[in-house]
Image (spheres, rainbow, N blue to C red):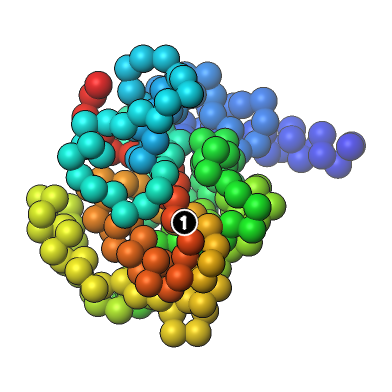
Amino acid sequence: MLMQSALRLIYPSECLLCRDMTESDFGLCGPCWRDTPFVVGLVCDQCGVPLLGEEGDLEALCDTCMTIARPWDRGRAAMTYGDNARKMVLGLKHGDRSDLVEPAARWMARAGAPLFEEGALFVPVPLHWTRLFARRYNQAAMLAQAVARSAGLEVCVDALVRKKRTAVLRDHDTEQRFAQLQDAIVPHPKRGVRMAGRCVILIDDVMTSGATLAASCEAAHRAGAETVHILTLARAAKEP
């Protein structure tokens, strides 16, 4: 205790985003917590976007998920993609902010609790090897490992393989995104069998159109997954 107290005096706890002092490690200060768009209340059962209304027993869907057929069963997101959520996603993806993984995983585990089943397998959305080489890590894999630890469930970081390098999807519309990802993701020739007959929970940092998650879901089904859910740190969405 004395050593911890001394370290706290030398290295006080800081907010993950603004670096102001906080009461505990790996947390947010009051203003940053207020400006972080956590998803609460009624949500779309397939993508996790917040909806107007009150929680009930019936499954609710957003307008997008009523329009686009999703190949997965259910989905959740910890926050909407904006403000501080965007900063965290970009920090994870491009800023070497590995310190964000554990708190992000805790928020994801809380949001994804309705999806967790006994024997479920967490599987990250894969990166093409060239992007993995350039980035040095797959943020989705890091999140999947941390969420699995929090939930006490298994994870397989290479159950899926991205065999085709696709163009950056940021400037593509929804139709182009889905076309780009056609047959781009496949089960791993050896470890893909771990998904057979199981509930698979796909993990990614952010969902926009859902094209990457759909391609991953279809690959999981080809490997024999019984059910597939999705869980993301953030969901890009229009204001309700």
How dense is the environment of label 1, judged by Cα within 10 Å: few (below 14), some, or many (20 and up)?
A: many
- Residue ID at (45%, 36%): 78
In front: 44, or 58?
A: 58
Instruction: Give the SS element for disc 1.
Output: strand
Q: Which amino acid does label 1 sit on?
A: Thr
* Farthest-out residue, right: 2
121 relative to 104, above or below: below
- Residue 189 in the image, given as x and y percentages of width and height: 44, 85
Total number of numbered discs in the rendering: 1
Q: Which of 28 and 59 is in front in this view?
A: 59
Q: Residue at x 31, y 71 (%)?
A: 185
User: Quadrant of residue 235 in the image?
Assistant: top left
Residue reaching furthest to the top? 53
Q: Residue at x 30, y 79 (%)?
A: 163
Is 204 situated above or below 83?
A: below
- Image spot of residue 21 (x, y percent): 59, 27
Q: In this view, does 34 lie above or below 174?
A: above
Between 221 and 213, the residue placed more toward the observer is 221
Q: Mark 1 points at which residue?
A: 227
Residue 55, image x, y percentages: 45, 19
Q: Is the C terminus in the top left, top right, bottom left or bottom right quadrant?
A: top left
Of 79 and 34, which appears nearest the observer?
A: 79
Does residue 106 appear in this view?
A: yes
Residue at x 65% of width, y 47% of height: 150
Quadrant in which the N terminus is drawn: top right
For residue 122, say whether it is visible. no
The reply, left or right, for residue 150 in relation to residue 196 is right
